[in-house]
Image (cartoon, coloured by chain):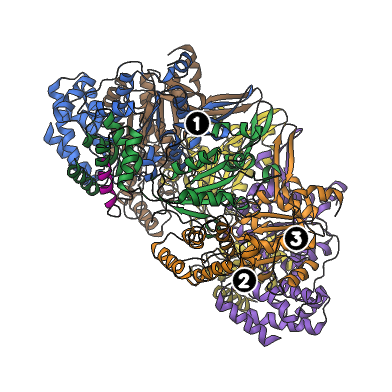
Chain colours: A green, B blue, C brown, D yellow, E purple, F orange
Amino acid sequence: MAHSDAQALAAWRLAAEPFYQPTGDEVARFQAATAQRLPVLIKGPTGCGKTRFVEHMAWRLGRPLVTVACHEDLSAGDLVGRWLLDAEGTRWQDGPLTLAARHGALCYLDELVEARADATVVIHPLTDTRRMLPLAQRDEVVPAHPDFQLVVSYNPSPLAREMKTSTRQRFCALEFGYPAPEREAGIVARESGLDIGRSAAIVAFGVRTRRLQGQGLDEGASTRMLVHAALLVQQGLAVGAACAMAVADALSDEPGVRQALHAALDASF
Amino acid sequence: MAHSDAQALAAWRLAAEPFYQPTGDEVARFQAATAQRLPVLIKGPTGCGKTRFVEHMAWRLGRPLVTVACHEDLSAGDLVGRWLLDAEGTRWQDGPLTLAARHGALCYLDELVEARADATVVIHPLTDTRRMLPLAQRDEVVPAHPDFQLVVSYNPSPLAREMKTSTRQRFCALEFGYPAPEREAGIVARESGLDIGRSAAIVAFGVRTRRLQGQGLDEGASTRMLVHAALLVQQGLAVGAACAMAVADALSDEPGVRQALHAALDASF
Amino acid sequence: MAHSDAQALAAWRLAAEPFYQPTGDEVARFQAATAQRLPVLIKGPTGCGKTRFVEHMAWRLGRPLVTVACHEDLSAGDLVGRWLLDAEGTRWQDGPLTLAARHGALCYLDELVEARADATVVIHPLTDTRRMLPLAQRDEVVPAHPDFQLVVSYNPSPLAREMKTSTRQRFCALEFGYPAPEREAGIVARESGLDIGRSAAIVAFGVRTRRLQGQGLDEGASTRMLVHAALLVQQGLAVGAACAMAVADALSDEPGVRQALHAALDASF
Amino acid sequence: MAHSDAQALAAWRLAAEPFYQPTGDEVARFQAATAQRLPVLIKGPTGCGKTRFVEHMAWRLGRPLVTVACHEDLSAGDLVGRWLLDAEGTRWQDGPLTLAARHGALCYLDELVEARADATVVIHPLTDTRRMLPLAQRDEVVPAHPDFQLVVSYNPSPLAREMKTSTRQRFCALEFGYPAPEREAGIVARESGLDIGRSAAIVAFGVRTRRLQGQGLDEGASTRMLVHAALLVQQGLAVGAACAMAVADALSDEPGVRQALHAALDASF
Amino acid sequence: MAHSDAQALAAWRLAAEPFYQPTGDEVARFQAATAQRLPVLIKGPTGCGKTRFVEHMAWRLGRPLVTVACHEDLSAGDLVGRWLLDAEGTRWQDGPLTLAARHGALCYLDELVEARADATVVIHPLTDTRRMLPLAQRDEVVPAHPDFQLVVSYNPSPLAREMKTSTRQRFCALEFGYPAPEREAGIVARESGLDIGRSAAIVAFGVRTRRLQGQGLDEGASTRMLVHAALLVQQGLAVGAACAMAVADALSDEPGVRQALHAALDASF
Amino acid sequence: MAHSDAQALAAWRLAAEPFYQPTGDEVARFQAATAQRLPVLIKGPTGCGKTRFVEHMAWRLGRPLVTVACHEDLSAGDLVGRWLLDAEGTRWQDGPLTLAARHGALCYLDELVEARADATVVIHPLTDTRRMLPLAQRDEVVPAHPDFQLVVSYNPSPLAREMKTSTRQRFCALEFGYPAPEREAGIVARESGLDIGRSAAIVAFGVRTRRLQGQGLDEGASTRMLVHAALLVQQGLAVGAACAMAVADALSDEPGVRQALHAALDASF
């Protein structure tokens, strides 16, 4: 990576190696896609480690990581950039996608399916053999840097919007789920500093909540929530109180689901 | 807190200690979340003391409190900031969220669920281990100040919008309800200066209104409304007239509910 | 009121005492709310005298009255103010709410429930114990002047939008209806200069129209319409022709309702 | 009218006396409203002479006439005015309503009910005893000129939007219909220069089309359309061809209605 | 036409006489409307020659032709003009309607019914006896040039939006359909240079497609499509292949309709 | 092509000959349309080679190719251009359509039917005998360069929006489908470098996925997806794993469809 590229992306370089525990051959698959410069689609439930995996791959590949959390008001201009007025007149400011394409970063569009149609379509010329980004407003066609790679994530719940076929067929897909319980307990212990025994108990409770999915609950506890519970225990809260605060009371407002969650809590601790 | 941070947040520092009477271990739970820099979600009905509790915690922690009342037109730009044109050209102005994140304040987003999707998503990188706020328009990534903490409130009534799972799972939750009657009478007496006897009578009426909830009434009288009634009594209105004006006539327009409220009024005074 | 405040609000000071005839203890109730700096919600049908009562209270309290007619496109910026570009660059212009809060006026938001969500929520910090108005765009927090008071009106017809609970519970309520016939005849006579006999006949017709409410007619004749009829009689129109022009032909376009109104007209004159 | 007011409104002064043939006491009724400065609502079908009547009254009263054709995108700013940027910086430009209110013209809002909510509400303070127009963007309150009068028109067809009660009750109403046939023939002859015989035949055809109203046809031929037909006859077209072109083929696209119109055409000529 | 008017409209003057073959008295009818300065509404299916007829009349009358293709985002500003910022500050730029009205051109609004409401209403004062165009943003009232005439087109298919009565009644109407086969063959031959025999065969196929209208097909082949087919034959394609490419494959995507079209193709060639 | 035209379009000139294998007479048909300057509509499923064919024709014709991926927020201004503010004041910037029309390029609008109505209509004057592009904002009428040709693509799936008849009838149509298996295997082998045997196996799997279309799957695997799978095999993944990642896991999220896809995967490898 050239010096000027490194400077442009300095703010987006990871400061420390993110902890990540592989669950299968996902690292090899991702590396194959990277070697062929193919865009990657990562599917899986909330908080199961998708973002952490992408951070891990950025660190492993030695590339900066430009992340954008997409939402239903995100437009192409938010990704690509725009003209700004400042004291010396107008100047062009690259958006995060252009920054990544021009200087060679991993660009991670979290929940791309939520974005506006123009934001979804703007990635098309970057995701086929053209690997270029036309900036219509600037009359410039940016060829993608060889190190540029696009990664998008997607939570395919029954409530989510569908990804358009013409977008979807551009990606190679990786599927994620929750880690197996013993592995998840290790993650919780490592992230919170709590002992493995209480970490495993918290994970056991988390697994119970996931069984309620589809019975009024959209999704069960994420690994992140279980780490939160362990962190609260580290501050002196009882395990039950910590799981109530970090998991049960946060997961749902529906009385029936609440009751089931607190029953699981009572059964667990 | 550095001198410059203190200056930037001076307008948002509380001038006096807000009165707050704890009802359980909510202070300890909040402090545990603060110690681990976890964001907090406060759930409960209108006017039950959520805002007052947050003010109390800000005072207790010695931190400024930046409050934003969210609504369905609140956009990410309203939270994060924008470029303004003024006499010397354009200058960037931090929005309330950026101000709090940059300089280290409690940031309280009241009824976050009402805000636009982009405003909801903009808090994501501040609420996970990244603890950073990318300002795309300014090409700056603001790392959160160690004293920054995010608190959001939410009234989980059947009519309210649902909070998205990917947002909800980032928070530890605290649940609030109305205080027990004797405690609420003490609050009314203290806030209004009215004697405890008439304060208790006003609270008894308020409790009656809460029983009408679900029978055409969305929510019963808040503690705030009862304080209003007591303040009007202090101005010389009869207790019944004060409760009609501050509570019964304000709560609903539906003839059936109005009749039930006035029956409760007649039964009470 | 300081000299500079008086200047800022000069355009909004009432030029003459508005005529108002009280119908109960509404003046005392309003004064109690004013003394405790509580916001007031005035409910009642179109043209029954709500605006006149607020003008009367402003005159009686010696305060300027800043009035805003709300509508479904009214935004927070319309109330709070905005940056304007003019010949010397940009300058901030206080909106009517900020003007009233900063310098100490009664601020009357007519039909607040019609306004956009952001306009409704912007009054929240002015209507609780904080009594402040954050101007996010200007990075200023305006503490309310001690003389500032907020008054909103609301016509709770079955067709009207509901006021949100979190807004509604901030107000003390006063309810208005049409004045009793003899009182209304006095008002019509005084406002138009017409003799009391014909004024009473016009009022009697007006009362008949109100009985048609709910039978295809949203609301019957307002006191204002009856005054209009009396003014047209003063110009030489026959009483029946004046009531047709000012009341019957203006109230409705539906053939059935029109027929009933003209039958009432024939029966009256 | 002061010299400067006359100058400001010069473009809106009628150049010649518009021909108008009264059909009842509408002139006297309008004059009574003018004398009392009451706003007037004119109701009636398309092209029956509402606009011509208002032009006639403006000429008779010696006042300029500012006309605005309302539509569903018309906003308050379109009526009130706005800040414009030009070569010397920004300057305020009065909209048509402000122009009329400030300098004293008849202001005619054609089909007001079609306008946006903010445009409808902006007339409220001009149509009650306040007779003022607050220009929030300019921090100015314009008192209405004594010669200012507001006139709005409205076509109360079953398909039209309803006028809001709080707007409607501010007006005195005048109702218009098509003129009686012999009177209408006189109008057609006078406006087109065609002889009275053929003018009467054209009117007879027009009356037939009005009987089709409600049978697939929203409205029958307006007086204006009949004048158009007569003008085409003056250019040498046959009466039947002229009525087909100016009336039958223009009124509807529905095959059934078209057939009925052409049958009426064949029966007439 | 004055020299400056001619200059302003130079870009809109037709370079060569457009070929047009009259099918009835449409030229005489149009000329009668032109002589009386009445606006004209041209109705008919896609590609039947409406635009060509208007070009022909503009050439015959010796007037420039300003054409605007309307669509559902076309606003009044797009027709009337707007203030533009350029290097020397702001300057007003007449829109196509203002250009035509000011300098005297035929103004042709293609598919006016598709435009936004404000664009539809803005033509009203140009289409009655006032013949003027108020430019509210510029505080100017443009009187229409004597040579200005408005022409609008409209395709009254069952799927089209309805034209509002208050707009429709301002126009004289001319109806167009497809030319008779022998006439249409002549047009195809003349426009493409193909011999009359193959032109007639192509037209015969086109007539067959029109019989499918209403059986899943919105409209049959336009004359334009048949000319396209003939042009492709001139390039060496077989007649069947040319008709498939220019007509059958372009007309519809529905399998059933496609099959019927290809059956017609096989039967024809 | 003139020197200045070549410069303006330099960024849009293809750098290398794109590989394309004809499947019928599509090249001859396209060339006939080009010779007659007729616009072309290319229909077919996602990823079947439409874009590659257009690139091939641009290369073969020696013309630059300006491509725009349309989407539901694409407006006329995005195609035509706009005024930009920069350091030296405002300047006009041609949009991609204007650039192509002015200087003579192939302009390829991918999925035009997705664009906004104003964007669809703006191409009309370029696609009939006028061959011109009016730039209303610039008061300029751009005559199309002789080398300009418009090509649009369209995926006529049951879920797609319909193209308006008045747009559709302007085009000659070419239909594309997936290549025959042996031809497709050759394409996969050539694009990925994989041997023909494994390429054929991958294609056989792809053909199986296409049979699932309409059974919960919108479209089967595109040729592009099969090339992706082959590229991953080249990186060392097993053929089954590569097809899972590049095809099966990317095509759908529905459990039933997923199961069918993995069954096809198991049957294939």
Residue A205 magenta: yes
Indicate left or right for F142 with D146 as reference. Answer: right
* Badge nearest the viewer, 3 or 1: 1
Q: Can residue D42 be seen in this view?
A: no
Vertical side of C1 occupied by B253: above or below: below
Q: Mark 1 lies on which chain?
A: A
Query: Within 10 Å of the Cα at label 3, are there few (<14), some (14-19), or many (20+) other Cα atoms?
Result: many
Label 3 sits on what residue type? Answer: Ala
Residue E224 is drawn in which quadrant?
A: bottom right
Between residue F215 and residue B24, name the one nearer to us. F215
Q: Mark 3 lies on which chain?
A: F
Between residue B30 and residue F97, name the one nearer to us. B30
Residue F179: which disc?
2
Between residue F170 and residue C201, name the one nearer to us. F170
Where is residue A199 shown, x and y percent of the image? Answer: 27, 38
Residue B268 is drawn in which quadrant?
A: top left
Give the spatial CA distance, label 3 vs label 1. 47 Å
Ranked by sequence position, the earlier of labels 3 and 2 is: 3
* Badge nearest the viewer, 1 or 2: 1
Secondary structure at badge 3 equals helix
Between residue A144 and residue F109, name the one nearer to us. A144
Vertical side of F123 occupied by C178: above or below: above
Question: Start and end of the magenta stretch?
Answer: A202-219
Name the residue tied to disc 1. A15
